[in-house]
Image: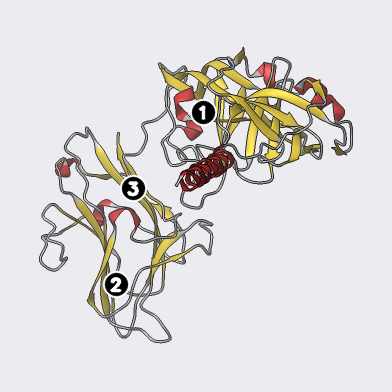
Amino acid sequence: MKMTIKNTLFILFATTIFLTSCKKDLDIPPISELPLGNIITIDSLRNIYTAFDSTITSDLSVYGIITADEVSGNLYKNLYLQDETNGILLKLKASSNKTFFEGDKVRVALKGTIISSYKDMIQLDNVDPEKNLIKQSEGNTIAPKVVTITDLALVGFYSPYQGQLIQLNDVEFMCSDFCSTYSDPVNQSSENRYLTDTLGNSIIVRTSGYASFAGTPIQQGKGSFVAVVSQYNSDVQLTIRKLSDLSLTGLRKNACPNCPLYVKNFEDQSITSGGWTTQNVVGNINWGIDNIGSNSTYYTKISNYTGTNIACETWLVSPSFDLSATANPVLTFQSAYKFNGTSLKLMVTTNYTGDVTTSTWVDISSSATWSAGNFAWITSGNVTLLSYKQPNVRFAYKYVGTNVDGSTWEIDDFTINDL
């Protein structure tokens, strides 16, 4: 009996030791350590680059704080790192958007990375976020350096603030960008906007079409602008981290025209985006998208000729507009056409039923200037909408073709302004 109890206690003790050992292994996995080597500054790292790319083969490390991350989508597989001496762009081998963030202090183990220059932007390339970056702490801040646009100009080949976080004061977007968004989220293409100061100096603000704020209208006032400095050949550019870094709410120095209340320019290559619809009353001829000819941008187009003329009645109907708060609403658009046939009609209604045949329409075609033919584009002029300062206003283009003739019509830049 004693032997049985003793054996049982031994087995329980051994089991406890085994389970404890297993639990310890699961909780504390082996930590891979990278050699620290010699510590250098970011300024010293940048100075390694001369005229050729250099792979770093020594155990060197650099410490810095991440000033711009991938969270907003304006950067992809890129981070900006800065210390008290300088800043630099880190080109990553894989995205780090779930690991490293603005305010993280990191050690960069430099062995195996490449100090290089792309279009005169000095960068640390071939950085593996899992192998070369080690987070030290979170929630750190680096105050942006308050500079002027002229301070950012090239000295030799490079901007002296390349890769650094800066702040511009008393700046505003140019009038040419006044009514724009920060970039093009539809085609997801990067676009340039331009900041200007009170002396007329300007600088590029380049934003990715993948940025979460790409489709946001730009701030229209004057104020402060925080961003990181990049460069593409001789162009110094600014990269926005997040919209909360911008405070352009003051009174502008340069007054700009009022922005349109609405624009449908078909550049997204969609007829029905934004709530537009089409209806076939007769036949099955439909509106399409094209970009050939002298207009050189996308527009909507309709023709009833497909080897022979086909009888049709097809409508292109706008979304609903509330014009009740406007002072002097006007409609403008561009048109072009060719070939004989019934003229395109511009219609308006305030009691749209969802069916063009049961809605009450007013023909306002005579208020617009139309193309003279031969696919010559012309602007309609201001079609006054003073009689429609109310909710639930819709517009439509009515196309009619017969089995013996039919014009080809093109429409672009449908715009509502409040003058």
**Numbered label attached to residue 57:** none
Q: Badge 1: few (under 14), some or many (20 or more) residues near its Cα, within 10 Å?
A: some
The residue that mark 1 highlights is 174
Percent across and percent down for residue 380 are: 35, 51
Three-letter code, disc 3: Thr
Q: Label 3, label 1: how many angstroms apart (C-alpha)?
A: 24 Å
Q: Badge 2: few (under 14), some or many (20 or more) residues near its Cα, within 10 Å?
A: some
The residue that mark 3 highlights is 332
Percent across and percent down for residue 336 are: 42, 61
Q: Secondary structure at mark 2?
A: loop
The residue under the point 41% across, 83% down is 306
Residue 57 vs residue 192: left or right? right
Residue 235 vs residue 199: left or right? right
Percent across and percent down for residue 356 are: 17, 65
Please state which of the two labelled residues, at mark 3 or mark 2, is closer to the viewer. 3
Depicted 308 relative to depicted 365: above or below: below
The residue under the point 46% across, 67% down is 374
In this view, the residue in front, 172 or 224, is 224
Depicted 89 relative to depicted 263: above or below: above
Of the residues under marks 3 and 2, which one precedes in the sequence?
3
The residue that mark 2 highlights is 342
Three-letter code, disc 1: Met
Percent across and percent down for residue 268 are: 44, 55
In this view, the residue in front, 87 or 227, is 87
Residue 378 vs residue 364: left or right? right
Q: Label 2, label 1: how many angstroms apart (C-alpha)?
A: 43 Å
Depicted 288 relative to depicted 249: above or below: below
